[in-house]
Image (cartoon, rainbow, N blue to C red):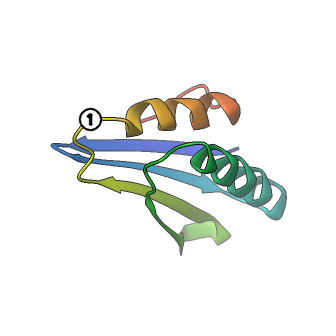
Amino acid sequence: MIDAEFRSEERFSRLALAYANDEEKNKVNSCVDSIIAKHKIKPEIHTTAISNGREVLVIEYHDDMDREAGAIFEEMICALDIKQCS
């Protein structure tokens, strides 16, 4: 199961997507890449290993004056069929 966590502050937004296996990893990466390619603003992205062999893909938008990241993150969450985001 892909887990999502969203954080936002003034002009900063972050979405973390945690996955457990190669199938989920490929699904997350291809979804994120295709959605980011459709938008003008580009995020910083990095992957980190977490507990129990899982990884997390972190997508961060800095200086998001017009708060465009929220709609982009919503599109990602819907495309990945994530029902709950903490």
Q: Quadrant of the N terminus?
A: top right
Which quadrant would residue 19 be assigned to in this image? Answer: bottom right
Q: How many marks?
A: 1
Q: Which residue is mark 1?
A: 66
In the picture, measured across the screen, residue 47 lies left or right of residue 5, that is right
Q: Position of residue 9 (x, y in %)?
A: 19, 44
User: Which residue occupies the foreground of this view, 23 or 74?
Assistant: 74
Furthest residue in direction left, as rendered:
10
Q: Quadrant of the C terminus?
A: top left
In the picture, measured across the screen, residue 69 lies left or right of residue 47, that is left
In the picture, measured across the screen, residue 45 lies left or right of residue 30, that is left
Circle 1 residues within 10 Å: few <14, some 14–19, many ≥20: few
Q: Is residue 12 above or below residue 52?
A: above
User: Which residue occupies the foreground of this view, 1 or 46?
Assistant: 46
Residue visible at 27% across and 42% down in the picture: 8
Furthest residue in direction right, as rendered:
23
Furthest residue in direction front, as rendered:
40
User: Which residue occupies the foreground of this view, 51 or 35?
Assistant: 35
Residue visible at 55% across and 61% down in the picture: 57
Q: Position of residue 22 (x, y in %)?
A: 81, 64
**SS state under label 1:** loop
The amino acid at mark 1 is Asp
Q: Is residue 42 above or below residue 50?
A: above
In the picture, measured across the screen, residue 24 lies left or right of residue 57, that is right
Residue visible at 55% across and 51% down in the picture: 17
Q: Position of residue 71 (x, y in %)?
A: 45, 30
Q: Position of residue 16 (x, y in %)?
A: 48, 52
